[in-house]
Amino acid sequence: MNERSGKDFWFRGHDTRFRPEDMNPTHWTKAIEQLIELRRKGIGLTNSTRYLEDYRTYLKVGRSDWKCKAGLLSLDILPDGRVTVCKEKPALCNIMDHHFLDYIRSNEFRRAAYKISEACEGCFYGEYREPYYALHEFSVFQEWVRDWLETSVMACDLKSGENSA
Ligand code: SF4
């Protein structure tokens, strides 16, 4: 549980447990460099190189803000149909609402989403950051495509192994 909010959110810049406070900066710098190196080689990480680089910057300067597009690039739909721009924020509507589609396509909704993300201190939730990176940085898009191709090849290999067994 997050000590400040009492909620189960750990990916905020203000949460000390999101920072390796007890670790020597030289060590976490080295650890992140190694993660970035693994990512560049396409080994075992789903977070993009850009995400890891931003996390490294955050550890150095303590800032987790970014150009969040919550509500525009992503939405969270709760089991009861409520719709939020991200999992930390209050619901703005419900998919069961009669005017849901009109509202979600409206400038009113865009303004509300913008206001929420503008007021937010930032986070490191990959599910919101990574789509933004993939759309704005070609290198991240390339990483996504490479992951998809590798996963597809692995799935084909597994399937052909099953068929030949
Ligand atoms: S930065 Fe955006 S995605 Fe992250 S917590 Fe704030 S509103 Fe949500």
Image: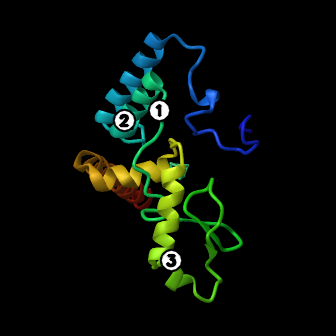
Q: Which residue is at 52% across, 84% downward?
A: 101
Name the disc covering residue 63, or none.
Answer: 1
Instruction: Kindly tell me whether mark 1's CB lies below 8 Å from ligand 1.
Output: no
Q: Give coordinates of residue 148: x percent, y percent.
A: 34, 54
Per the image, the residue denoted by label 3 is 104
Q: Which residue is at 48% across, 37% downward?
A: 64
Which label's residue is closer to the chain start, 1 or 2?
2
- Label 2 residue SS: loop
Q: Give coordinates of residue 69: x percent, y percent.
A: 43, 57
Residue 95 appearing in the image: yes
Per the image, the residue denoted by label 2 is 43
Q: Which residue is at 62% across, 27% downward?
A: 16
- Label 1 residue SS: loop
Residue in front for this viewpoint, 75 or 4: 4
Which label's residue is closer to the chain start, 2 or 3?
2
Q: Amino acid at mark 1?
A: Arg
Q: CA distance from mark 1 to mark 2?
A: 28 Å
